[in-house]
Amino acid sequence: MSAISTSHPSSGAATLRADFPALVLPVRRGLARWAVLSVGLGVVLAAGWWVTNSPAFDMRSLKVEGNVHVTTAEVASLSGLTATSNVLWLHADEVERRVEADPWVLDARVSRDLPSGIFVTVEERTPVAVTAGREPMLVAGDGMVLGPADDTVRLPVIETNGRFSPGQRVPDSDELAVVRSLPPELLPMAAKVRGGDGGSLALALRDGVEVAYGDATAAEAKSEALRAVLSWAARHGIHPVSVDVRAPTAPALSPTG
């Protein structure tokens, strides 16, 4: 825009200017305000970073729960946590994955106890079988090889091909499915699972009883039927020679003699 000039005979030449809002001062005030806010925000963020990364949040206690075979020291080593680990900025999922790298650990959960405590809750695998061969290994229900089995272990033996190391998995099989289905109180009584012709499975108990399973279908129902039959026989003083649970709704028992 341009200024407008007019003249009047009585007043001589005169220059009139259009009135404009005073913009310069408010703009400068706005810029100054934003500058102050930016500096203040920067100070707050810097202070927050310093506080959250200060030694106040360094780990001072690590508590482990649920572990039996894996020691607390082993969990601490697996976790990668140290005295300088920041509890506030802890990546719990990464710690959980590191702990679950141990074959005994089925699941790990990490929680914080601010400002300086960490809890690790561990769920361990349970061995249900032993591999056959000169170097027997403990095997969990999901096929995970847990470690060497000593002579005191009373778990059923399953046939496997090859040698296994802790952390490997044995192939899933009908034999493992049967063992996995056994109630905990029957596991020490079971000696071996054998595969027969046509996929027929037989479970040998340590007291000499032979159990016919048929195939691995409805394994849990068959194992529950076996538990019920053995419990009934024990209450009535009967020692079976064999038990047939191929039809779990109508199990059969052959007594001694």
Image (cartoon, helix red, strand yellow):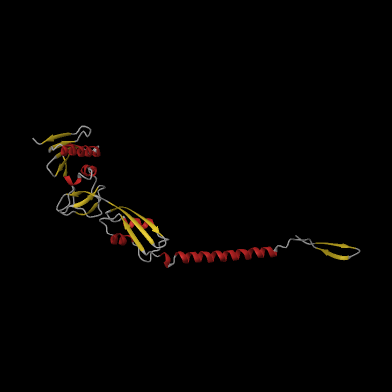
Can you see residue 118?
yes
| In the image, residue 164 above or below residue 34 | above
Vertically, is 245 above or below 37? Answer: above
Taking the spot 53% from the left edge, 66% from the top edge, the residue there is 43
Indicate the position of residue 201 as horizontal and vertical percent values: 18, 39
Residue most extreme to the left? 257
Residue 214 horizontal/vertical position (percent): 19, 36
Quadrant in which the C terminus appears? top left
State the residue in front, 135 or 152: 152
The spot of residue 207 in percent (x, y) is 12, 43
- Would you identify the image quadrant in which residue 109 lies? bottom left
* Total numbered badges shown on the rendered structure: 0
Which residue is found at the position 14% from the left and 39% from the top?
210
Question: Is residue 200 in view?
Answer: no
Rendered location of residue 38, percent (x, y):
57, 64
Looking at this view, is 8 or 115 the one in front? 115
Q: Tell me which residue sits at (63%, 64%) in the image.
A: 31
